[in-house]
Image (cartoon, rainbow, N blue to C red):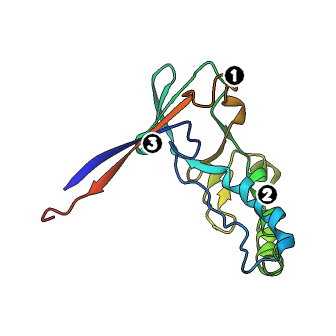
Amino acid sequence: MNLPHWEFYINNTSSGHGLNFHYLVYNEVKDSPSLKIPLDKATSELNDLFLVFPFEKELAPGVKLFGDGNLIIYNPDRPSFWLPVTVREVVELELAFYNIREDDKQWVYPYLKTAADKLTTEELDAPAYGGSEDAILGVNGLKQGLQIMKFNKEYWDRSPPPSAVQLITSGITVIQIMDNW
């Protein structure tokens, strides 16, 4: 038996859309202490990106429904809550990340750089989408896959107290329940 399960989040920028990027951070066991700051910065910037399910419809002013049952309740008088990013932005962040650790510099970076150098100016400047036919970079400007976005920090109204509700995200998850459970 399948049961729907709704989850609601208040002021949570990592919910209400598709998959979040999850690059691994500094590893205290493997990494030199000199890599902590650059790895944390590069990881943070990449992890600010996420895939967004397609927009389905506006249910009311300030209420948008996206694919896979993702509902966003927001203040329509504020700037957009999500901002699209370009292929160039994603590629530059990936190259910066893989140009920090020595192993990555030697093995991963040159491979990704070669793939990036093959992209046209038009594709680099296009809105970024997750996935690609060659899947080396995992990003394309051909509208293949889900669009890559980041949260717009300018959306937040900093005048009310931090406890003020400014964004509600919700999603439905279908839970599989065993019939004989």
Is 136 placed left or right of 116 in the picture? left
Please, what is the three-letter code of the amino acid marked with disc 1?
Answer: Ser
Q: Earlier in the sequence, mark 1 or mark 2?
A: 2
| Residue drawn where x is 56% and y is 50% of the image | 146
Is 174 placed left or right of 106 in the picture? left
Give residue 1's quadrant in the image: bottom left
Q: Residues within 10 Å of mark 1 (few under 14, many from 20)?
A: few
The numbered disc on residue 67 is 3
| Residue drawn where x is 62% and y is 61% of the image | 22
Q: Residues within 10 Å of mark 3 (few under 14, many from 20)?
A: some
Q: Position of residue 98 (x, y in %)?
A: 78, 69
Real-space CA distance between mark 1 and mark 2, rounded to the nearest whole angstrom? 28 Å
Nearer the camera: disc 2 or disc 3 = 2
Q: Residues within 10 Å of mark 2 (few under 14, many from 20)?
A: some
Real-space CA distance between mark 2 and mark 3, rounded to the nearest whole angstrom? 31 Å
| Residue drawn where x is 52% and y is 23% of the image | 62
Real-space CA distance between mark 1 and mark 3, rounded to the nearest whole angstrom? 32 Å
| Residue drawn where x is 69% and y is 64% of the image | 137
Residue marked by disc 2 = 41
Please, what is the three-letter code of the amino acid marked with disc 2?
Answer: Lys
**Residue 99 visible:** no
Which one is nearer the viewer's eye here, 27 or 152?
A: 27
Q: Is residue 128 above or below residue 28?
A: above
Residue marked by disc 1 = 159
The numbered disc on residue 58 is none
Q: Secondary structure at mark 3?
A: helix
